[in-house]
């Protein structure tokens, strides 16, 4: 299993997408984002958010397709048909405002259903992170209908309890994955290495083995190491803090522990797209099973596309 941690950051950018919204009880006028139109900017409960709100155009290996918003009503049901690229993974993110309602995730539920009935249940507030809970499956055509169901949760709260939803909004962003070669990687910020937020943290296991480039070394040079360990519960953690990608084998077996914020492509590359800390972990038993020397790990790393010492491999007790 993979464990993924990602920092949150927010930035607004301009959009270019199209959407047709079909609600229970009627059809909304299509709002074509990115061009002038005589059609209304919004009709009924849903509207297309032309500036993208707090949903970045690109983040975590995904590109924003469309953002829609509605008042936080008792229940919102409908279908969003979005332009997609066949074969690309789809992801949904949700934002609930205002922030003064601190228990939105308990009071509001959302289910978005994509191709082949894959249903995502995105939480509020993660507009820059492609969470596993937001996975919608793979686009099959140039347009994809997504069924939307947002509702107030009364399982734990009685109607009218808690803060008022007056003026509250639910905003949903739909994303699709972008191939590494086509993704616009961000430039390296000046003085990044001096930032405490960017510094590596010490492994919790003080005896952990760490493999990776030091400052001033070529971050894209292949590296390898042989590690001897007999610790129970030992794990291999791959950490990234800047754009680049890695292909890793351990005892000749590929590391496959990618997660939504550091996705593994179909060729086995673990990809990092942003200047944020990301990590993913696998147990060493995945690589030593059936080995004549179960305490021996041969780690080989092939990096590509890094602009600085922004990756490392940590072998030690599970963090």
Image: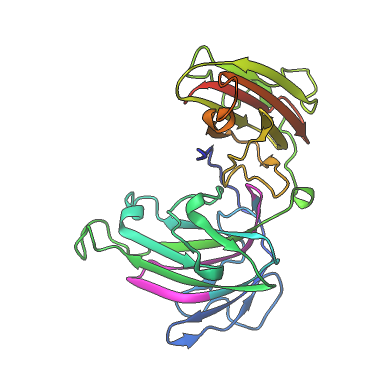
Residue at the (57%, 66%) spot, across then down: 49
> Which residue is nearer to you in this view: 255 or 275?
255
Residue at the (63%, 36%) spot, across then down: 255
User: x, y (%) of residue 253?
Assistant: 66, 34
Q: Is residue 66 magenta?
A: yes
Left or right of residue 73: residue 23 = right
Q: Is residue 237 magenta?
A: no
> Which residue is nearer to you in this view: 297 or 176?
297
User: x, y (%) of residue 208?
Assistant: 54, 16
Residue at the (54%, 70%) spot, across then down: 116
Q: Main secondary structure of the magenta part?
A: strand
What segment carries the magenta color? 59-79
Q: Can residue 191 be seen from the camera position used here? A: no
Image colouring: rainbow
Farthest residue toward the top?
A: 207
122 is higher (above) or lower (below) than 66: above
Residue at the (74%, 27%) spot, across then down: 308
Picture quarter containing residue 192?
top right
178 is higher (above) or lower (below) than 32: above
User: x, y (%) of residue 32?
Assistant: 66, 75
């Amino acid at each position: 299993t993979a464990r993924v941690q990602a920092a949150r950051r927010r930035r607004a950018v301009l959009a270019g997408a199209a959407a047709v919204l079909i609600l229970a009880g009627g059809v909304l006028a299509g709002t074509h984002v990115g061009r002038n139109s005589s059609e209304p900017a919004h009709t009924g409960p849903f509207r297309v958010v032309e500036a993208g709100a707090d949903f970045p155009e690109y983040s975590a290996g995904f590109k924003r397709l469309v953002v829609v918003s509605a008042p936080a009503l008792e229940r919102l049901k409908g279908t969003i048909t979005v332009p997609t690229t066949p074969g690309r993974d789809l992801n949904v993110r949700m934002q609930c405002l205002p922030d003064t309602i601190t228990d939105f995730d308990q009071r509001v539920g959302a289910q978005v259903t994509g191709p082949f009935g894959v249903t995502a249940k995105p939480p509020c507030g993660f507009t820059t992170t492609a969470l596993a809970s937001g996975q919608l499956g793979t686009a099959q055509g140039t347009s994809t209908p997504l069924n939307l169901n947002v509702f107030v949760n009364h399982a734990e709260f009685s109607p009218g309890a808690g803060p008022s939803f007056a003026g509250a909004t639910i905003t949903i962003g739909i994303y699709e994955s972008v191939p590494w070669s086509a993704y616009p990687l961000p430039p390296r910020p000046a003085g990044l290495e001096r930032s405490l937020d960017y510094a590596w943290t010490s492994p919790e296991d003080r005896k952990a083995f760490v493999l990776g480039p030091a400052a001033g070394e070529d971050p894209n040079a292949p590296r390898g190491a042989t590690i001897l360990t007999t610790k129970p519960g030992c794990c291999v953690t791959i950490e990234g803090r800047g754009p680049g990608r890695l292909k890793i084998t351990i005892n000749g077996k590929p590391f496959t522990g990618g997660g939504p914020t550091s996705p593994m492509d179909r060729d086995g590359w673990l990809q990092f797209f942003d200047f944020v800390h990301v990590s993913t972990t696998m147990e060493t038993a995945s690589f030593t099973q059936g080995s004549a020397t179960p305490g021996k790990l041969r780690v080989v790393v092939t990096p590509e596309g890094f602009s600085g010492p922004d990756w490392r491999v940590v072998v030690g007790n599970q963090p």
